[in-house]
Amino acid sequence: MQASLAAPERVTATPEALELIARLHAQHGPLMFHQSGGCCDGSAPMCFARGEFLVGDSDVLLGHIGSEPFYMSRPQFAVWEHTQITVDVVPGGGGMFSLERPTGLRFLIRSRLFNDEESQALRLRPVA
């Protein structure tokens, strides 16, 4: 009998991103991320103080990075559901309303496609 593969996380973060998240959490309290898609600021994950951005039925909770929830718009998720997102940071200005903007760093996403086994395991664990 073959052992089943545990479902991979849909969203992860690099150590550098986790460090920046911890700094922002210390300054602003609980945070949340939202990835809306689109152009300009919508193409990068936005970091908000939790409660400053309202999520609704059109958003999907992909998981948590650090202890902070990461949401994506449902239409965007329909395109990205086969990929694992890794939140990273690079030098530059963040999105206009994103909390990392004054730090001289900005969040960005990197991604990879799930393999067949991971995709099968994810089918058994739907998103919220």
Image (tube, rainbow, N blue to C red):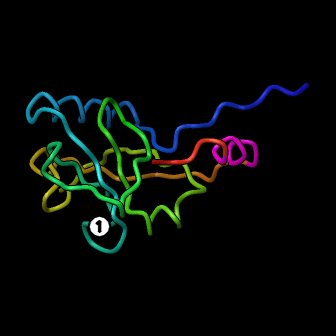
Tell which residue pokes out farthest to the right in this image. 1
Residue 119 falls within the magenta-colored stretch = yes
Secondary structure type for disc 1:
helix
Judge from the rendering whether residue 34 lies leftward or rightward of residue 61; answer left or right.
left
Which residue is the site of mark 1?
42
Q: Which of the 4 quarters of the picture holds residue 14?
A: top left
Label 1: how many Cα within 10 Å (few below 14, some 14–19, many 20+): few
Residue 6 falls within the magenta-colored stretch = no
Tell which residue pokes out farthest to the bottom in this image. 39
Quarter containing the N terminus = top right
Where is residue 34 shown, x and y percent of the image? 30, 54
Residues in magenta, as a range: 116-123
Please tell me which residue lies in front, 73 or 100: 73
Q: Residue at x 55, y 57 (%)?
A: 81
Where is residue 119 shown, x and y percent of the image? 68, 48
Question: What amino acid does circle 1 point to?
Answer: Gly
Judge from the rendering whether residue 8 lies leftward or rightward of residue 108; answer left or right.
right
Where is residue 39 shown, x and y percent of the image? 32, 74
Classify 43 as above or below 3: below
Q: Residue at x 53, y 38 (%)?
A: 9
Judge from the rendering whether residue 90 lies leftward or rightward of residue 12; answer left or right.
left
The main secondary structure of the magenta stretch is helix
Classify 3 as above or below 49: above
